[in-house]
Image (cartoon, grey):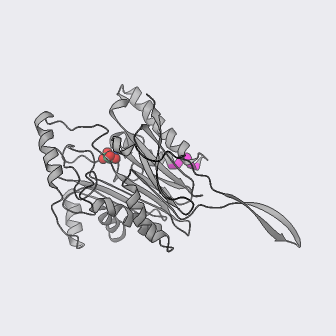
Amino acid sequence: MKNRRTFLKLSALSTAAIAIKPLQSLGKTSFIYNTKTNKPIVLSTWRFGLEANAAAWEVLKTGGRSLDAVEAGVRVPEGDPAERSVGYGGRPDRDGRVTLDACIMDEFSNIGSVACLEYIKHPISVARAVMEKTPHVMLVGEGALQFALAQGFRKENLLVEESEKEWKEWLKTTQYKPLANIENHDTIGMVAMDANGNLSGACTTSGMAFKMHGRVGDSPIIGAGLYVDNEVGAATATGQGEEVIRTAGSYLVVELMRQGKTPETACKEAVERIVKLQQRRNKNLKDIQIGFIALNKQGQYGAYCLQSGFNYAVYDTQGGNRLLDAAYYLKG
Ligand code: ASP
């Protein structure tokens, strides 16, 4: 996780510029305060968010739709065999099977999701197809695979040599229990606002490494791993999916922004909610990581996580593409 820490330390909060514009009304000059929206903008989880943002930006900079941007963005780590927590190359479950989870949501609250999908390199595009081509919002396992194949997606082996090696090592020492720690799971969650001010999000992962076969985390669950409300903002999560599901984490972040919280404060309160529930259940906080990122309708953004080491990438016209460290709860 160290390699994820050595990045720019910049403020996690951006501020939308306040512009004062003269208004000609009834022959008099008066003034109104306009909050200038910071758009287009895209943000995504972890260091691989930089490359993903760059692909999303190609869509956004030419006035494209945020939905197309987030799909194009997260396909980058999905297709990269060196990224071993997402898509092709993802670490397998405890049975040695690579099972993928993904979901997508647009400005109209259209949603699509797949869970426990095997053999398909780009689960996010299957999730989008579920959204656009079926009367349903979620397909899982064999049914999701059948649907993907019927849509023309190609069946491929997703288990790369490195991941297989790691899994075999893990089998030797783990007494065949699913392993949950902060080192072996990462997800790309991405939220974006396009030049028209419309929000979308995407989230995709191979989930917790060496999980039980059939285990589904937060990432394909709308409201948990991702939520978008085009009137308010969007949020996405990474980390221990069970805890994010327990708190409907991304939905919670968006609802807190609806109450007027800044993106960072909303993320912080969602993390604190998880802390409280962990404590109530006598669970050790140090065993898990949780990270949220959020974007509001003004183009302000922020993030917060449970323990240090979570970073996220932001791309906007003001600052270009950069990696930021999220503020965190557990000090020392
Ligand atoms: N949230 C994902 C899951 O629990 C894993 C991660 O973000 O690292 O499946």
Could one spot residue 301 in this view of the protein?
A: yes
303 with respect to 218 (left or right)? right
Q: Position of residue 239 (x, y in %)?
A: 35, 43
Q: Nearer the viewer, residue 321 or 180?
A: 321
Left or right of residue 205, residue 58 in this image: right
Q: Residue at x 56, y 48 (%)?
A: 13
| x 51%, y 67%: residue | 194
Q: Which image quarter: residue 5?
A: top left
Q: Quadrant of the C terminus?
A: top left
- Say if 36 sits above or below 327 in the image: below
Residue visible at 77% across and 61% down in the picture: 32
**Residue 199 screen position, x and y as percent:** 50, 62
Query: What count of labels does the image hold?
Result: 0
Task: Note whether 162 is above or below 274 in the view shown.
Answer: below
Quadrant where the N terminus is found in the figure: top left
Q: Nearer the viewer, residue 247 or 70?
A: 70
Residue lying farthest top? 282
Given the current orientation, which residue lies at the most extreme right position? 27
Task: Specify whether residue 248 is in view.
Answer: no
- Check if residue 232 falls in the magenta segment: no
Coordinates of residue 119 in the picture (x, y in percent): 18, 61
Q: Which residues are magenta?
A: 254-258
Residue 48: x %, y % from top left: 36, 55
Q: Main secondary structure of the magenta part?
A: helix
Q: Is 53 placed above or below 324 here?
A: below
